[in-house]
Amino acid sequence: MKVILCTILLIGTAVAASVIPRIVGGKPATPHEFPYMVSLQWVGMGISQHFCGGSLLNARWVLTAAHCVNALQGDDDIVAGAHSLRNPDEYEQRRKVLRTFTHEDYNGNVGPHDIGLIYVLEPFEFNDHVHNLDLPLRESFYPTGYATISGWGSMSNTTVPEYPDLLMKADLPIQSLELCFEIYDNTPLHNTNVCAGELDGSKAVCSGDSGSPLVKKDSEDGVVVYGITSWTYVPCGTPGTTGVFVNVSYYYQWIKEIMDYYSN
């Protein structure tokens, strides 16, 4: 088996056709069901291509994976309110990047601390179709139960990707960290990760889901981001494996300090 980041094969390559990334075993979301969801898109020659997901923390800050931040190429768009990649509707909002941040302990490869922030040039306009989610209130907390993933990642559980047009979703069981270390023995798995996915491979994250949020609803029906899609085995959905996510609760102070210091 080979360990890779969900989009690491896209970084530094010239294979643009393999960029547009469904969640394995997922189903289409209702349009604008996830108003906090963003698409990171490379822009060039009049063409926009999705390469990573992210989530809105407020009108100007986007939470994503560090390897997604490192994949930005310059004139990229951060897109909120998207549903169909091929047929954007009137609710879609596009913004340019002003500043980016990656965790200082991230090594640029498969590994822990794969967390990044993007500060957009102009704020998004919040409405019923575009608005933020919440950070966990408890620090260093390992979630349990089921959590929801959304994204435009590949829906294939083979080495040949299949890409959706519509935003997809799936409810994934969170696996214990102890089991995760058994599955990912001798890998970069870290205690700041969360593992989620069906062990039979029927539901899993895949290429293009990187940076996308793993969320749960709180007691007041608010949405809280507990994980950031980071890496998995390939082929995606290999039985006996799970997706690996950054455990956001471990980075609460890091996120807040950057946002407080750099916000205008």
Image (cartoon, rainbow, N blue to C red):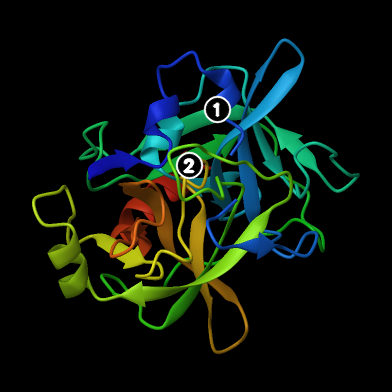
Residue linked to disc 2? 207
Residue at left offset 37%, top offset 38%:
66
Q: Position of residue 88 (x, y in %)?
A: 84, 40
**Image quarter hosting the N terminus:** top left
- Residue at 69%, 53% in the rendered image: 167
Q: Which mark, residue 115? A: none
For numbered disc 1, what is the local secondary structure?
helix
- Looking at the rendered image, the quarter that the C terminus falls into is top right
- The amino acid sitting under disc 1 is Ser
> In which quadrant of the rendered view does residue 126 lie?
bottom right
Which residue appears at 37% of the width and 74% of the height? 174
**Height in image: 214 above or below 12?**
below
Residue at 11% over, 57% down: 185
Q: Earlier in the sequence, mark 1 or mark 2?
A: 1
Q: Which residue is mark 1?
A: 18
Looking at the rendering, which quadrant does residue 220 occupy? bottom right
Front position in the image: 143 or 184: 184
Choose top left, top right, bottom left or bottom right for residue 148: bottom right
Tag 1 near tag 2, CB within 8 Å = yes
- Is residue 106 shown above or below 178? above
Residue count near mark 2 (Cα–Cα under 10 Å), binned few <14, some 14–19, many ≥20: many
- Outermost residue, left side: 186
**Label 2 is placed on what type of residue?**
Ser
Whether residue 118 is visible here, answered yes or no, is yes
